[in-house]
Amino acid sequence: MKKLLILGASLILALSFNANAQPPQQAQIVSKADMNTVEFVVRDGKPILMDIYQFKEQKTESGRPVFIYAFGGAWAMGSRVDALCNPLYDHLCEKGWVCVSIDYRLGSARGRDGQPLITPPEGYNPFQYSIDIGVEDIYAATVWLIDHADEYNIDPTKIVISGSSAGAINSMNAEYYICSGHRIAKENLPADFNYAGVIPMAGAVYLTGENDTQLRWDKTPCPMCFFHGSTDPTVTFDVENNPNRHGFGPNYISKQLYAMDVPYMLYEYFGGDHVMALLPLKWFWNEIDSFLDRIVLDGQNIKVHAVERSPKPRTNENFLDSVRPGQFQAVNRMRGQGGGAPGGQGVRPQGAPQGAPQR
């Protein structure tokens, strides 16, 4: 349990602002695209919302592709409302996409009394439960969009899911559950559905079952575009195995995709840490465009593992506070109270990162 709490605490480095600050943050949102908010599901009597961005007057000959984004925040904090994301939404909408920013249940959130706001069923691993209810809500948003495809002129066969940190983990687990015949996918999605792509920003597949020590794909997965720091201490770049959980990062999964002849792009920031949960939202638009245009829309079978090297890689410490002032220091305070990296040290590992596989 302690290591699960450590992972959750360190994931707060990912993205999200305090929920108490939502109204001022929302007032600062500036978007070129038209936006409307809809309730896509009700959980425990509470509506869950998503914002749909599009250019309503945009003329298209066929249904438009959809980009769904899930925020980060350790399954404890955050919101679909995030000014950092809107320039990317505007950019994709101008290219003909419909962008959807979703809320989801925060399985690790706690009230002012320190008690969990959501209690997992008896015997359900709390860490896995936080992921799984997030996956359920991604599926619910997907089904809502499929049901309203005509209204929004979207193509249900071209839905891409993405996310940062916790949102990226939810997205990757969502695809794995489809391709491994998981109960959650069977109960919440049409039988023949699969996503057109997944874009995880510092994400991995995490499982907690005793037998889940490797990934077994019963169905061919969709193309994936990974962004990850090679020394990320928060979400594994390769493989993480301990008694509480098993993590499978993009360096591991990309090799499986290569063996299955599935298109993918892996952008590795050599020496970078969990900052890759945020960097793509501002500085990797060309790479995102390349994946969406060439692989998702044009169907090209491309396999890329690109490694970016820098004398001084961007890190959480030198980047996060430029976009969310005070966040890095706040997380360090949490680390001092028992949080930190998955290994429990609260510092970035100094060992050599995994190199790019030879293709």
Image: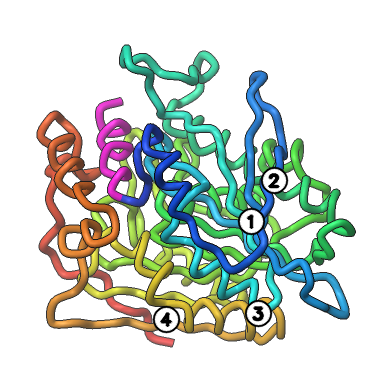
- Secondary element under disc 2, as helix, strand or loop, is helix
Label 1 vs label 2, nearer the camera: 1
- Secondary element under disc 3, as helix, strand or loop, is loop
Q: Is residue 160 visible?
A: no
- Per the image, the residue denoted by label 1 is 100
Residue contact at pointers 1 and 2, CB within 8 angstroms: yes
Q: Residue type at mark 1: give it.
A: Val
Q: Residue type at mark 3: give it.
A: Lys
Q: Which mark is residue 305?
A: 4
Q: Residues within 10 Å of mark 2 (few under 14, many from 20)?
A: many
Q: Earlier in the sequence, mark 1 or mark 2?
A: 1
Q: Is residue 188 above or below residue 235?
A: above
Q: Which residues are magenta?
A: 1-13
Residue 2 is inside the magenta segment: yes
Residue contact at pointers 3 and 1, CB within 8 angstroms: no
Residue 220 is inside the magenta segment: no
Instruction: Quote the CA–CA distance across marks 4 and 1.
Output: 28 Å
- Secondary element under disc 1, as helix, strand or loop, is strand
Q: Residue type at mark 2: give it.
A: Ala
Q: Is residue 45 above or below residue 218?
A: above
